[in-house]
Image (cartoon, helix red, strand yellow):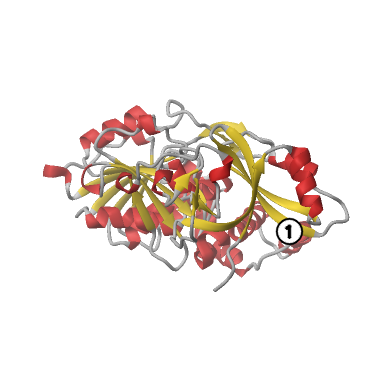
Amino acid sequence: MDPELVARLADGPGRALLDSLDAYAADSALALSTQLRAAGHDPQLVSAVLAQARLRGLATDKFGGAADRMLFTADGLEQATRPELAARHAQRFVAAGVDAVTDLGCGIGSDAMALAEAGLTVTAVEVDPVTAAVARANLAPWPATRVVQSPAEAVSLPREVGGRHTGVWVDPGRRVTGARDVDGRARRVFSLDAISPSWAQVQAWAAEVPATGAKLSPALPHAAVPVGVEAQWSSWRGEVLECAVWWGPLAQVSGRTAAVCRPGADPAILTEADVRDEPTLTGIEGIGPWLLEADRAVVRAGLSGALPGRELSAGVGYACADAPVELPWLRCWALVEAMPLRVKAVRAWLRARAIGHVTVKKRGTSVDTDRLRRELTVPGLTRSATLVVTTVAGHPVALVVEPPPRA
């Protein structure tokens, strides 16, 4: 696909054809393509329309009904910020008194859309010409928003005294251009030295424009967090999606924070001040009767010490408590049994209780969960159980847990 074809999809007959298509099954694509071409539609446009219809279907989980009004690239859809998190990014700028934001590395425009929706003036910058054309189409409902096809490093940033009315949002590329994995997706990079623009460049922009925010990988090392900024790890429905670093007036608290985001509720926010200085367990005999599991954003942020009770192992995200605990950033389990992780012994315990299937959850251990699940499966036994595999005092343990009874 090229920018000209994107423009045809964004408006006129191409857009009308795209909007007229309902979701279609993959095995009907050939027949539908043949039908559209027989109706006189340009074959190149038909291929692009079918590809967009497929991407819109995939995008519904992330963008909801808005997906039916958007254009996508495959990589852009995968890397786009969820609207719920993008809206939270935008509110940071609004709360800081910023009214104009330069979005460097805007991708298909998810964050830029949220910024524009919040009433901010947005200059969206994207180096890839096709992706820039897609962003331009997605941002069309906000005429004051401008899309610039350019390397981020070549853009002159706006300046104001004090830097309070202008801001910068950076979403560095974390994929290798041209390199694809077995599923055809651009390969992910994990080193801060490999992202584009570089981490050094992002920090240089933050020094130039105080109100700067950057979306980074959840794997951001704690040691890489600059002094005086806020680094917030965010999850959505239990999946950690990003670590956003906020400088200057955008930082609401200095240090590492976690935002546990869920549909229909305000995010649960934890900071380093919530961490308690409590010793971890020294042996398996101290576990029980309740197991507390911290959200993964809390673990990634290094804040699992905020868990009530005593941690099983430092930083893993499990603690035991004497009573059930209800907090929006943790899950509570009733502990049924705790034992050393020895496959034969665990299998015998399960078999004695007619349990033939297990769901394995692990943290803080390199155990192969698929292999362990197979080893613990007993054909013919239909009962199931949840098995938590983790460590206590450096030793691997298996914990059989179940959800607490409903009140």
- Label 1 secondary element: helix
Q: How many numbered tags mark residues here?
A: 1
Taking depth in this image into account, of 360 and 159 the one nearest to the observer is 360
Mark 1 Cα shell of 10 Å, populated few (<14), some (14-19), many (≥20)? some
**Amino acid type of disc 1?**
Ser
The answer, for residue 372, to whether it is visible in the render is: yes
Q: Splitting the image into 4 quarters, where does residue 33 fall? A: bottom right
The answer, for residue 104, to whether it is visible in the render is: no
- Residue in the image at 57% along x and 62% along y: 60
Horizontal placement of 132 versus 8: left or right? left
Seen from this angle, which residue lies furthest top? Answer: 193
Q: Position of residue 153 (x, y in %)?
A: 34, 32
Seen from this angle, which residue lies furthest front? Answer: 285
* Residue at the spot of label 1: 33
Taking depth in this image into account, of 39 and 292 the one nearest to the observer is 292
Q: Position of residue 3 (x, y in %)?
A: 51, 46
Q: Splitting the image into 4 quarters, where does residue 246 fall? A: top left
Seen from this angle, which residue lies furthest left? Answer: 161
Seen from this angle, which residue lies furthest right? Answer: 380
Taking depth in this image into account, of 244 and 1 the one nearest to the observer is 244
- Residue in the image at 65% along x and 68% along y: 22
Image quarter of the C terminus: bottom right
Q: Position of residue 104 (x, y in %)?
A: 36, 42
Q: Position of residue 174 (x, y in %)?
A: 48, 36
